[in-house]
Amino acid sequence: MDQSHRPAWSPSSWQRKTPLQQPDYPDHDQLEDVLKVLATRPPLVTSWEIERLKRQLAEAAQGKRFLLQGGDCAESLSDCRAGVITRRLKILLQMSLVLVYGLHVPVVRIGRFAGQYAKPRSADRETRAGVSLPSYRGDIVNRPGFSEVDRLPDPRYMLEAYSASALTLNFVRALTAGGFADLHHPEYWDLDFLSHSPLEDEYSSMVSAIRNALKFMEMIHEAPIEGLSTVEFYTSHEALLLPYEQALTRTVPHNRGVYNLSTHFPWVGMRTASADSVHVEYARGLSNPIGIKIGPNTGPDELLQLIEILDPSDEPGRLTLITRFGHNRIADHLPPLVDAVRRSGRTVLWCCDPMHGNTETTDGGVKTRRFDNIMSELKQAFAIHDSVGSFLGGVHIELTGDDVTECVGGARGLAENDLQRAYKSTVDPRLNGEQALELAFEIVRQIQRNRTHSAK
Ligand code: PEP
Ligand code: CO
């Protein structure tokens, strides 16, 4: 597309389009007041961090890094607590250690946290026993309880979500800059579940191998190796609630462009990812790297159109395609998309979300996901990319460090009747710490298998 024919963009140009997945705020003056306050609040992240992430994603798109993106489906304000944040960070660190160790490439770590408070819903209203109320849209909009008061969208929740994001990020930054992620002390980030887990041996032998390698290097070096006590973490969330996102979209003194400074990596969800959508309109003008969820309804032509709109200059690191089809659909849907992108000569980062296409409801009415189906979609994603000379550069996972029972299967063989024991998610079922770690080990096995296969 000729750039000169692109319609003008501004942080508010999305307002010209038909709204989608937005709450109906009853009090417009109150909404305006909140947005004015938000627009004066300091940014949560900086443009140079965002640019650094973009460079790292560009490397991932070339196979020089691997992207690990994970966290809650929906953060809740009541979970803005030290324990929850620490445990989630620990499991992400452990997974990334497994990946670095097994894949021999650096990992880009992006949390689904410090802002993942807005949820798209398939229906605007929910009906229970003849009573119809607005759907729950995440803690930034309303509350999950089924009452008139809970479900009323309240703009003041945006200020609460902004503050909780800032508190979360502040704690994550302090932890990751201090000794918490220190490779000399991986025991700091051991989780309780490991001491009685079927994965314990595999994990501890990896940790002691790393510790020995470190000792060896420091002996040769005759000094501690700098830089091993900190890790980089980036944040991401679905850029869904557009008035909030706009209020934190800013220009900055020393970089050109316009940045969403509420997060490093905003993504567009599947329900709002059509080429003419209001969310794509908002995202196209940002200087951040952008993720977009691609599901079974996106064909090759629309995908190429999306790439043209979101990344007209083929900027390295700009676009991550997060595919989510389901284990029984990926084999039909992914190959034509990979093929179309390859023919177009564009470079994107392919990331697999093996969670959202594999959600099901048990006979007892509980929303769950089967570990085997999650693994199956992921393995197929690796194999499909490999078979056409492309490669999978990342994974997108819903997980928690807490010992929940929301997804069935995994090393401990969680069954459907275990789900009631510790089901806490208000939206989608997450992998617990043990299942998430098992998934990381499986990713390593899969990539190593593909490498051996292509070396033959
Ligand atoms: C999500 O990531 O929680 C989500 C709603 O995903 P998707 O847009 O892929 O359905
Ligand atoms: Co989800």
Image (spheres, helix red, strand yellow):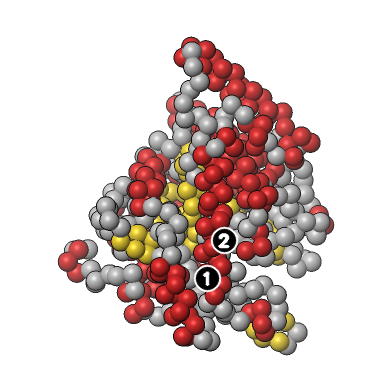
In this view, the residue in front, 447 or 223, is 223
Label 1: how many Cα within 10 Å (few below 14, some 14–19, many 20+): many
Residue 97 point in image, percent of width and height? 57, 34
Residue at left 46%, top 26%? 226
- Quick one: quadrant of the N terminus? bottom left
Residue at horizontal 61 percent and vertical 77 percent from the top: 135
The image position of residue 269, as x and y in percent, is: 48, 64
Residue 52 percent location from the top left of the image: 37, 44
Q: Mark 1 points at which residue?
A: 158
Q: Residue at x 75, y 40 (%)?
A: 193
Q: Is residue 294 visible?
A: no
Q: Which residue is drawn at 63% across and 43% down?
A: 91
- SS class, disc 1: helix
Q: In which quarter of the image is residue 120?
A: bottom right
Residue type marked 1: Met
All told, the count of numbered labels is 2
For numbered disc 2, what is the local secondary structure?
A: helix
Q: Name the residue under label 2.
A: 164
**Earlier residue among tags 2 and 1:** 1
Judge by depth and name the residue closer to the eye, 251 or 33: 33
Using the image, tell me which numbered label, if any, was put on residue 216: none
Q: Is there any visible trace of residue 41 in the rendered image?
A: yes
Taking the image as shown, residue 115 lies to the left or right of residue 196, namely: left
Q: In this view, does 432 lie to the left or right of 279?
A: right
Give, as a three-letter code, the residue at label 2.
Ala
